Amino acid sequence: MLKKLYSLREPTRNGLELASRMFKQLETICSKLIEDRNSVIKIHPELSFLVTDNPTQIQGAFEEKNTVFYEMETVLGLLKNKSIDKCFLEKKKEYKTPLVSKSILLNQDSINEKSLYDYVDESSFTSLMNSIQDVVNNLQDQRNKMHHTMDKILKVPEKLKNYESGSILIRARDINTLNEKISLNLDLFEQFKEDYESLVSHDNQLKQVISQVERNIMTLSEQDYIVLSHDTQEIGLVVGEMQDYVKSLRLIADETFVKSQQYSSFLDEYKNQAIMIHEVFSIIHDSISELVLIYDNCNILINQFIKLSNELWNLIAWYQEYYVAYDELILEMNQRNIFRNHQQDWFNKVSTELEKSIKDEIERRNMFIQNLGQYLPSDLCPGIKNLPATYSIQQTSIDEFVVPSDESVALATSSLANNS
């Protein structure tokens, strides 16, 4: 059994030594990888303004402004075209209306006509739209400044045509792609650590078993040996996977290092050339400063735009609900009128039936007295001549409200059906 155990010791030791060397390499690579990534992340935002795919953020704000303004104009148009039922506009007057001509009455009717828009506070949306337009105008100014600065930078190669100048392509999506690759490989490094720790654990276990068997402290069964042998055979596969981890991590580390060197040397290259040509130095220095300022200003303006546009979208949603709520109000008042009419009909019916039943009872009692009263002693049943009890139904409160026209009810029903 000891001979079998000794045969497992050498492949375990070799695999562990190889994994240990790779682990130290990976620790160094990961440390440098994170350092280079931070360098890229720091430099990327300012330089990203030098290419065309970043101004799309500003263009997106312009398109969003057009969309939200169009939606606001649409909902305001709906409110303007929704006439208020005259029942809501009538006001009780304590004096008699003087006689006026029909033409004057027609003019007054047209003056008194109102729409849902008349109940909207114009300042609530005009101030928001003006603020959004101001932000968009400022973004346009920043974009113009950006293009102007980029034009100045594009003229630099002409001034430096006697010097070799490298080029670098910076796209906004580069930083996200790079981060995704780095995150994936850092996860692989964590998996590598777990595999490495499992190898160390297996090696320790094997050493302990051999030591105990050598000292006759324990007797290793054939089944336990098979388990140890199987784990030892797995070392080759684990080490192979570790080598794949190292290869993958080196690739992304090299890519990140190159990107870091490109980004860092991009400004350094211009600065070194600018030392020799003062005019070019001034252009580059001022341009980079302008780009950094534009970058900061655009960040502030974009955040302002997002906040204001969200407020305007919320206001549009409120106006849309207001439009629907008016139709619901028309149907609600119509339903209340239906209930009141039904209640009045019921009241009239009950009152009529009550009056008739009392009248019939009086006639019946009178007929009884007339036919039999003369034969009954007066003190036998004194209450025989009493009249039946009477009742009355009284209205305890007043429910006053306006009643919309049948036309308004029909329009509201149709409108709600179309919106459902």
Image (tube, rainbow, N blue to C red):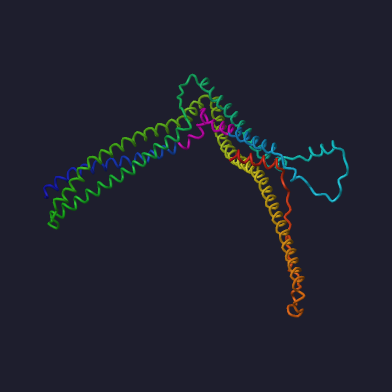
Q: Dividing the picture into quarters, in which one does residue 37 lie?
A: top left
Position of the C terminus by quadrant: top right
Closest to the observer: 225 or 24? 225
Closest to the observer: 49 or 418? 418
Does the rendering let one see residue 122? Answer: no
What's drawn in magenta, residue-wise?
40-63
Q: Is residue 284 magenta?
A: no
Q: How many marks?
A: 0
Q: Dividing the picture into quarters, in which one does residue 303 lie?
A: top right
Location of residue 31 in the rendering, given as x and y in whole percent from the top left corner: 37, 41
Left or right: where 144 falls relative to 186: right
Location of residue 379 in the rendering, given as x and y in whole percent from the top left corner: 76, 80
Does the rendering let one see residue 23? Answer: yes
Closest to the observer: 226 or 95? 95
Residue at the far right in the pictured view: 99
Left or right: where 251 falls relative to 274: left
Location of residue 187 in the rendering, given as x and y in whole percent from the top left corner: 36, 42
Left or right: where 292 falls relative to 99: left
Q: Main secondary structure of the magenta part?
A: helix
